[in-house]
C-alpha cells in the first residue's frame, strides 16, 4: 500500500520539514509514503490560470488507478477515529495507492477536485499549507495506530 501526499509549493521552514520527515518515517511501518511537491504558480498569473496550472501539475503526479482524496476547506470534517475508518477504507479501495491532494494558497483547481473520490477538511481553522502537510501526516499516523489498536496519546 502506498500513501502519497501531492502538494503545491516547497516547504521552507526546516522545523516543519523535519516534522514531515519524522511522520513519514513513522508511517513507513504501515505503508510506503511519499511526499511530492509541485511548483506553485507565479503571482503574476490570474487566480484562475494559477489554479489551473497548479492543478495540472498535481494531476500529472497521480496515477490513473490511484484513489484521490482532496484536502478542501469545504470537505467533510471528521475526528481522528472517523478519519482512521476513512483512511483504512481508502487504502483498501485504492489498492496500490491513495493520494492526498493539497492545493496552493488559491486552493485546488476544479479539475483536481473533480478527480477526487472524496474531500476532507482538516479543521475549520486556517493553516499554512506547510502546516497542513505536517498535520495530515500526523493524522495519517494516528489513524493507522487507531486501526491497529495501538496506543497513541490522546
Image (cartoon, rainbow, N blue to C red):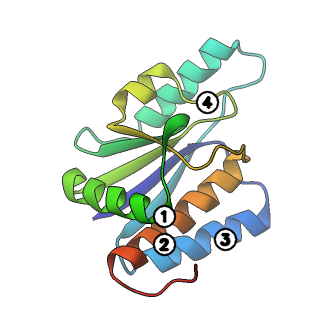
Vertical comparison of 143 with 129: above or below: below
The image quarter in which residue 17 lies: bottom right
Vertical comparison of 94 with 106: above or below: below
Give the number of the disc on residue 69.
Answer: none
Disc 2 packing (10 Å; few <14; some 14–19; many ≥20):
many
Q: Position of residue 58 (x, y in %)?
A: 48, 36
Q: Which residue is mark 2?
A: 142
Tell me if label 2 and label 1 are in contact, CB under 8 Å. yes
Q: Earlier in the sequence, mark 1 or mark 3?
A: 3
Q: Earlier in the sequence, mark 4 or mark 1?
A: 1
Looking at the rendered image, the quarter that the N terminus falls into is bottom left
Gap in angstroms between the C-alphas marked 2 and 1: 7 Å
Give the number of the disc on residue 80.
Answer: 1
Q: Which residue is mark 3?
A: 19
Gap in angstroms between the C-alphas marked 3 and 4: 23 Å
Is residue 38 rendered to the left or right of residue 67?
right
Tag nearer the camera, 2 or 1: 1
Residue drawn at point x = 60 percent, y = 76 percent: 22
Gap in angstroms between the C-alphas marked 4 and 1: 23 Å
Tell me if label 4 and label 1 are in contact, CB under 8 Å. no
Disc 3 packing (10 Å; few <14; some 14–19; many ≥20):
some
Residue drawn at point x = 35 percent, y = 76 percent: 30
Viewer-proximal residue among 53 and 113:
113
Tag nearer the camera, 4 or 2: 2
Q: Which residue is mark 4?
A: 107
The image quarter in which residue 87 lies: bottom left
Amino acid at each position: 500500500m502506498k500513501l502519497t501526499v501531492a502538494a503545491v509549493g516547497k516547504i521552507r521552514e526546516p522545523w516543519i520539514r523535519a516534522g514531515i520527515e519524522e511522520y513519514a518515517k513513522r508511517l513507513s511501518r504501515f505503508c510506503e509514503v511519499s511526499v511530492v511537491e509541485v511548483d506553485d504558480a507565479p503571482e503574476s498569473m490570474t487566480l484562475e490560470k494559477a489554479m489551473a496550472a497548479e492543478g495540472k501539475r498535481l494531476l500529472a503526479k497521480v496515477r490513473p488507478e490511484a484513489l484521490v482524496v482532496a484536502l478542501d476547506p469545504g470537505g467533510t470534517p471528521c475526528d481522528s477515529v472517523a478519519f482512521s475508518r476513512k483512511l483504512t477504507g481508502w487504502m483498501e479501495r485504492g489498492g496500490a495507492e491513495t493520494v492526498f491532494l493539497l492545493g496552493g494558497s488559491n486552493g485546488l483547481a476544479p479539475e483536481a477536485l473533480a478527480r477526487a473520490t472524496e474531500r476532507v477538511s482538516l479543521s475549520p481553522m486556517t493553516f499554512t499549507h506547510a502546516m497542513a502537510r505536517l498535520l495530515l501526516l500526523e493524522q495519517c499516523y494516528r489513524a493507522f495506530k487507531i486501526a491497529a489498536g495501538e496506543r497513541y496519546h490522546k
